[in-house]
Image: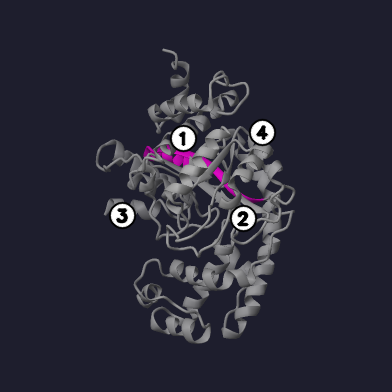
Amino acid sequence: MVVEKLEQQVNDPDRAVRLAAAAELGRLIREGDLTRTALEEVNNHVHTTWSFSPYEPAAAAWQAWKAGLGIVGSIDHDSIGAARELRDACAMIGIASTVGFELRVSFLDTPLADRKINNPDSAGIVYMCVHGVPLAQIDRVARFLAPVNIERNKRNLAQVERLQTLVGRYGYDLDFERDVVPLSRADEGGSITERHILYAMALQTISMKGKGEPLVDFLRKELRIPLSTGVEGLLLDEGNPHYAYDLLGVFKSNFLSRFFIQPGREECLDARTVVSFGKSIGAIPAYAYLGDVGQSVTGDKREEHFEDSYLDQLMDVLVDLGYPAITYMPPRNTVAQMERLQHLARERDLMEISGVDINSSRQSFNCPELLLPCCRHLVDAAWALVAHEKLSDRDPKLGLFCEDNPLADLSLTERLARYSAMGRKMDPRHPERIMELWEGRKA
């Protein structure tokens, strides 16, 4: 009963309540009242309420600990707002942390301008992550992203208006300021995404029609949305705890392409600008590989072609743009896709980072695919990322890719091995003590 209450509090709207609950959970763990089976799995790509997710940062830390993960990382679209809380909660609970952000960037001034690269909605626009942001640089990141969100919200307002013109005749009254903004953390530096818009639509649908058969009839007969047997079963279950998220998924498949407005250059900064900024703050910019979708590994994507037919060229463009890393999600790709990507990355001396984006209450924090023979090195890379971030907190010269790093003469493989070893040995409750490991690395 005590733990159940703390689990609720760690996801409370009040940050002070969340961190107090995280501290108490940490005490119960230290004293042996709470135990878990620790796994080799890690996840560097968990979204929080600062973009779109049911999880506050402290709750993400707790859910990751419960899942047996060794590392949890926050990644939010166009926001770094979760970073400090995630770091603090992880230290309290006793799980290693890493923080970063994700954003769309422009490839319109590259040889791939007219290609659909890794973005299902846009040609010449790419998703990328900036991993391992040092503590001292969090405020600088927030300032960097603020203009991006201003531009994004101009587009969000227009998208809500476009959606309302599509569905107003069915009884909807969707308003950006009234219905969408309150679902976000925009007033605290969070971003507003298309998922927020669709979630507002889902909530308004439930308010209008209730749950179960009346809502399903409305979807089928009025909105003319075809429902699979599985999805229909979920929406007929009025006790389904993921109801609004499942309904969001239905609307995403059927409405997103109809109200989506292409982002412009003001919102999608040139990739070179973002890569340069990421390096300037001692973080690790990473291109996010998607890969062609044939028979969808995860079962949630239609057949579509992305980077695979020109992957060699893309990897060369990434090097030219200054990317030091790539990131990819093992559950989304076949072994053949990953092995090809890994070979090309090693040829170009690019770091490989993994992570599976969590933005729904239905998703598991676990990633057993990391234990495949072709993916185990990604676990070591995650520990190296943790060490990079925590060492950079203490001294910027200790970043993995800093030219002044005392280990700069070592190969990337050797540096990753050294950093991974320190990350694994580090006490997650006292990450600042990693300096003792650095200073004793020759002992």
Q: Which mark is residue 280?
A: 4
Q: Quadrant of the N terminus?
A: bottom left
Going by the picture, which residue comes out furthest to the top? 443
* Amino acid beneath label 1: Ala
The percent coordinates of residue 274 (x first, y second) are 67, 42
Tell me where residue 250 appears, x and y as whole percent. 48, 72
The residue at which mark 1 appears reads as 381
For the rendered model, the colour scheme is one colour
Q: Residues within 10 Å of mark 2 (few under 14, many from 20)?
A: few
Circle 3: residue type: Glu
User: Residue visible at 62% across and 53% down?
Assistant: 117
Q: Label 4 vs label 1: CA separation? A: 21 Å
**Residue matched to label 3:** 4
The mark lying in front, picked from 1 and 3, is: 1
Q: Please report whichever mark, 3 or 2, sits nearer to the chain's N-terminal start.
A: 3
Q: Toward the viewer: 188 or 384?
A: 384
Residue identified by numbered label 2? 187
Q: Are marks 2 and 4 in contact (CB under 8 Å)?
A: no
**Residue nearer the viewer, 160 or 41:** 41
Residue 172 to residue 319: above or below = below
Indicate left or right for 310 with 364 as reference: right
How many angstroms separate mark 2 from mark 4 (CA)? 27 Å
Mark 4 / mark 3, whichever is N-terminal: 3
* Residue 80, visible in the rendered structure: no
Q: Which residue: 73% across, 58% down? A: 264
Q: CA distance from mark 4 to mark 3?
A: 43 Å
* Range covered by the magenta-colored residues: 86-105
Residue 379 in sight in this render: yes
